[in-house]
Structure formats: structure tokens, C-alpha cells
């Protein structure tokens, strides 16, 4: 039985065998500089690989796949010990789709060969992942997607277009759903694949956003050959496999671990304290309400994470993602109002292709504009309201006339 004491012992052994490289402290004006990094230290990537092999990456994953079959709640024990030792992390924001969406889906539906091939380079950050789900004609109605995958021997030939693909320009692999049978209803004719983004026929084009940046992309797939060994799940089961991905996505977005006043409420609270000349009674009341709402959402997310210890994420993640989008938009709008004319300024409209989204590291104008996308990405708020109504509250489902109609016969 793996317990906290055992994990601390294993973590200490990892640190002793692979002492991580520490960055030298900043120059001090009050004394001599600290010692340089030890020549015996393990560099970042080698340390992360050793951590994975020791089962201390995802402690709740199986042995040999980065885990020890331990309770998920004990991950915090390992993380705390490594943070105290100054060990590097795997930069989770850079590969959020891989860690939060691809990995749990591969673990649940992948073959042993797929798990061995993909999970380790994914966790250590050698291979970044993106998500090829949404299409220009199938956004909110994802099951209506039209990208085709046709079997040719031991491969599938894929043709189509995907859109809103975060980080595709930095990704090596993608999780992809495509239509393999147009003669059955739309949910039944989809298959799930792992797509090599370096393959011939994969073209990534920047999609400039309201912020001026292009963190999103369009991806065009032209006669892309995917070996059948990169199919995840059975042929035609892609919608079922995708539900695991989407549930994990919503939990990853809405269930992030934050300290008090973490996230969007932090910058506006800081401005309020430091700039008393900007305060009004109306703004004060609105800020208090949003502060309380943010704290409630933070504690609810903590409860959701604790529930995950017992099993797979459920539709509750949809509710948290809804709250995340609403709060971000309301808070960023209030911040612009608090700052007055300053809030209308924007730092840089230059077209950039960032590796990650940094809400708190930019100015108020960026937060206001970027938060508009929160009610679209990860499932639109309208679709998530339906999910909460039907799957959480148990309300009657909306009438759907296309569920039993072959995809090829649907009007588009």
C-alpha cells in the first residue's frame, strides 16, 4: 500500500540519485553570490524522465506509466516535496492539452503499445499536443463534423479542415476525430486518431484573434496518412472516446487550482487597493460581489478535484467551466471600468504566435479582449448549459430530430 510516507521516501531517493539543477540565486548587494549549480546535478529533461520512471509523475497512473497505482490525492505530497527541493516541473501550461486531455484519454482507451509510446514523452514535455476537433461547419454541433478518414490497407487517409486549434504551430501530435462512416447517424460514424503534425499534408495557418495574437490556428488535412496503429478505440467509437477528452478538458479549464485572489480577480483587487482615487461606491459593491463569486468558484473547484480522486470526471466540470467563463468576462469588464481611460489602452497589437495564454501577465485590455473567447473554447456556454440541464439536473432533453438520420442525409 503506497501512503504519504512511502511517497516521501521515494521522492527523497529520486532527489538523491538525480539531484536537480538549481538556478543560481540573483546577484545580491548585501553579500557574496550563492554557489553555482553543482556539476553533478541532473539537467531538467533527464530529471523529469527519472521522475516519470520512478512513478512520481502521475502517482495514480499504473506502474510503468508514470505512476504507482496510488490514490490520486497523494500527488500533492510528491509535488510539495519536489517544490521544496527546487526541482523543475514539466511546464504544464505549455502542454495543457496533452497533460489534461490527451493523456487521460490514451490511458483509458489506448493499447499497451500506445501508452508506452506516448505517455512518457508527453509528460516530460518532449512532445506537445493539440486538439483537432472543431470544424468551420461543426463547432457547437461537434458530432456533425465532416473531416473524412478512409481506410486504405493498414492506414487511414484523412481529408478535411479543423479550426480554433490552440498551439498547433508548436505541437508534434494531435488528438483527432474524423468521420469514417457517413451512412450511419452522426454520433456513430466517428473514429478517434492520434495524428503526427509533422506528416505530409498537415498545414497549419495562424488564425488572428481580437487580441492581435494567433494562439489559435486553422489546420488543413490533405491526404494525410495515419497508420491504424494510431487509432484510439474501436472504429466508430470515436464519439465515446471523445467524451473522455471533453470531460477532462472542462475540468482542466474550470477546475484549476488557485490561491485566494488567484486568477482574474487578483489584478483588479490589487489595483483597487493601490489606487484609491479610482474608487466609487458602485464599483466597490460590484467588486465585492465578484470577489465573493470568485472565492466560491475557487472552493467549488477544490471540491471537484477532491471528487476526482474517486474516479473519472463527470459532467460537473461543465458547470465549473461555465462559471470560469462568466467570471472572467465580468471581472475583466469591471477592471477596465475601474481603470477608466487607462483601461482603454492596449500594449501591443503585433501578430504573435505565443506558446501559452498568460491572463495575469498582461494588461487589463488584453484580459478584457481575451476573456471573450472563454465562453467559446472548451465548449460554448450555450452547449454547456444544455449539458448541465440534462446530465446534472436530469431535466428533459431538447427534441433532436437528427439523432437517427444518416450523416450523409443531414442538411448542411
Image: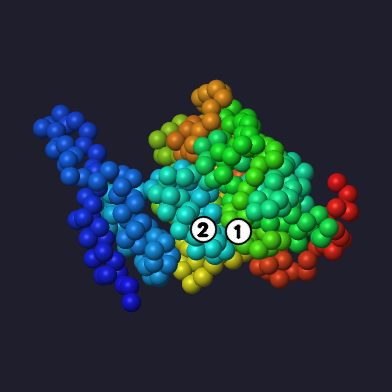
Q: Secondary structure at mark 1?
A: strand
The residue at 19%/56% (across/down) is 16
Confirm or deny contact between disc 2 and disc 1 (CB under 8 A): yes
Q: Position of residue 348 (x, y in %)?
A: 52, 23
| Mark linked to residue 232 | 1
Residue drawn at x 33%, y 77% is 1
The residue labelled by disc 2 is 114
Cα separation between marks 2 and 1: 9 Å
Q: Position of residue 10 (x, y in %)?
A: 26, 64
Tell which circle, 2 or 1, labels the residue nearer the N-terminal end: 2
Q: Residue at x 63, y 31 (%)?
A: 205
Question: Looking at the image, which is closer to me, 166 or 149?
Answer: 149
Residue 156 is left or right of residue 409, and the answer is left
Residue 394, image x and y in percent? 71, 71
Query: With 328 as the anchor, is 295 left or right in this view?
Result: left
The image position of residue 264, as x and y in percent, is 50, 44
Nearest the viewer among 350 and 179 is 179
Amino acid at each position: 500500500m503506497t501512503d504519504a510516507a512511502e511517497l516521501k521516501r521515494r521522492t527523497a531517493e529520486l532527489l538523491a540519485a538525480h539531484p536537480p539543477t538549481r538556478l543560481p540565486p540573483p546577484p545580491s548587494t548585501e553579500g557574496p553570490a550563492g554557489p553555482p549549480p553543482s556539476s553533478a546535478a541532473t539537467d531538467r529533461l533527464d530529471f523529469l524522465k527519472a521522475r516519470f520512471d520512478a512513478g512520481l509523475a502521475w502517482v495514480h497512473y499504473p506502474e510503468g506509466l508514470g505512476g504507482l497505482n496510488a490514490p490520486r490525492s497523494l500527488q500533492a505530497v510528491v509535488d510539495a516535496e519536489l517544490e521544496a527541493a527546487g526541482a523543475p516541473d514539466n511546464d504544464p501550461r505549455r502542454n495543457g492539452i496533452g497533460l489534461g486531455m490527451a493523456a487521460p484519454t490514451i490511458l483509458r482507451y489506448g493499447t499497451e503499445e500506445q501508452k508506452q509510446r506516448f505517455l512518457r514523452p508527453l509528460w516530460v514535455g518532449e512532445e506537445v499536443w493539440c486538439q483537432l476537433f472543431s470544424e468551420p461547419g461543426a463547432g457547437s454541433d461537434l458530432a456533425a463534423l465532416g473531416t473524412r478518414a478512409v481506410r486504405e490497407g493498414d492506414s487511414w487517409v484523412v481529408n478535411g479542415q479543423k479550426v480554433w486549434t490552440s498551439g498547433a504551430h508548436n505541437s508534434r501530435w494531435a488528438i483527432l476525430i474524423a468521420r469514417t462512416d457517413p451512412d450511419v447517424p452522426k454520433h456513430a460514424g466517428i473514429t478517434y486518431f492520434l495524428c503526427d503534425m509533422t506528416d505530409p499534408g498537415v498545414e497549419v495557418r495562424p488564425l488572428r484573434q481580437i487580441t492581435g495574437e494567433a494562439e489559435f490556428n486553422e489546420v488543413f488535412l490533405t491526404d494525410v496518412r495515419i497508420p491504424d496503429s494510431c487509432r484510439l478505440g474501436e472504429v466508430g467509437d470515436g464519439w465515446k472516446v471523445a467524451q473522455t477528452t471533453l470531460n477532462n478538458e472542462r475540468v482542466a479549464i474550470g477546475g484549476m487550482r488557485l490561491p485566494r485572489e488567484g486568477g482574474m480577480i487578483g489584478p483588479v483587487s490589487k489595483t483597487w487597493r493601490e489606487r484609491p482615487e479610482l474608487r466609487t461606491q458602485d464599483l466597490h459593491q460590484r467588486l465585492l460581489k465578484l470577489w465573493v463569486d470568485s472565492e466560491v468558484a475557487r472552493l467549488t473547484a477544490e471540491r471537484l478535484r477532491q471528487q476526482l480522486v474517486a474516479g473519472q470526471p463527470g459532467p460537473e466540470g461543465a458547470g465549473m467551466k461555465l462559471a470560469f467563463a462568466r467570471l472572467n468576462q465580468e471581472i475583466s469588464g469591471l477592471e477596465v471600468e475601474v481603470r477608466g481611460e487607462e483601461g482603454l489602452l492596449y500594449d501591443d497589437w503585433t501578430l504573435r504566435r505565443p506558446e501559452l495564454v498568460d491572463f495575469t501577465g498582461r494588461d487589463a485590455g488584453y484580459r478584457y479582449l481575451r476573456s471573450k473567447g472563454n465562453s467559446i473554447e472548451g465548449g460554448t456556454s450555450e452547449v454547456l448549459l444544455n449539458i448541465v440541464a440534462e446530465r446534472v439536473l436530469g431535466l428533459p432533453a431538447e427534441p433532436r430530430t437528427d439523432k437517427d438520420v444518416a450523416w450523409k442525409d443531414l442538411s448542411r
